[in-house]
Image: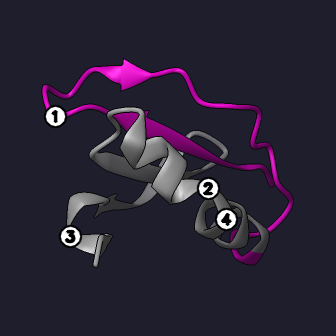
Amino acid sequence: MTWTWKLEDADGNTLETPESDLSSQGDAESWLGERWRDFAADGATVVELLEDGRSVYRMDLQGSEE
């Protein structure tokens, strides 16, 4: 299984995502946890976790900022 992230801006456009083919959900979530602030600063507002191309969940980055 391959876990990847999809980044979207406020208009729903897909943004370029750095290589993130990871082997587990935990690795993918840790990978995002280290980078989400940078992605938000670059205009990403929503991220979507994909397992072998299938959507697992979506998350709003704007609600994560404190």
Q: CA distance from mark 4 to mark 3?
A: 17 Å
Q: Left or right of 30: which side holds 33?
A: left
Q: Left or right of 35: which side holds 38?
A: left
Q: CA distance from mark 1 to mark 4?
A: 21 Å
**Secondary structure state at the residue bearing disc 2:** helix
Q: Position of residue 39 (x, y in %)?
A: 48, 43
Q: CA distance from mark 3 to mark 1?
A: 13 Å
Between discs 4 and 3, the one toward the N terminus = 4
Between discs 3 and 1, the one toward the N terminus = 1
Q: Left or right of 29: which side holds 44?
A: left
- Asked if the magenta segment contains residue 62, the reply would be no
Q: Nearer the viewer, residue 45 or 52?
A: 45
Q: Position of residue 11 (x, y in %)?
A: 13, 25
**Quadrant of image for the N terminus:** bottom right
At x 28%, y 79%, the residue is: 66
Asked where in the image residue 33 lies, by quadrant, the reply is bottom right
Q: In this figure, which residue is indicated by the disc labeled 2?
A: 35
Q: Amino acid at mark 3?
A: Gly
Query: What's drawn in magenta, residue-wise?
Result: 1-26
**Secondary structure state at the residue bearing disc 4:** helix
Q: Amino acid at mark 2?
A: Arg
Q: In this figure, which residue is indicated by the disc labeled 3?
A: 63
Q: CA distance from mark 1 to mark 2?
A: 18 Å
Query: Which class describes the residues within 10 Å of circle 1: few (<14), some (14-19), or many (20+)?
Result: few
Q: In this figure, which residue is indicated by the disc labeled 1?
A: 10
The relative height of residue 53 versus residue 13 in the rendered view (above or below) is: below
Q: Amino acid at mark 4?
A: Glu
Q: Mark 4 touching mark 2, by CB under 8 A? A: yes
Q: In this figure, which residue is indicated by the disc labeled 4?
A: 34
Q: Mark 4 touching mark 3, by CB under 8 A? A: no
Nearer the camera: disc 1 or disc 4? 4
Between discs 2 and 3, the one toward the N terminus = 2
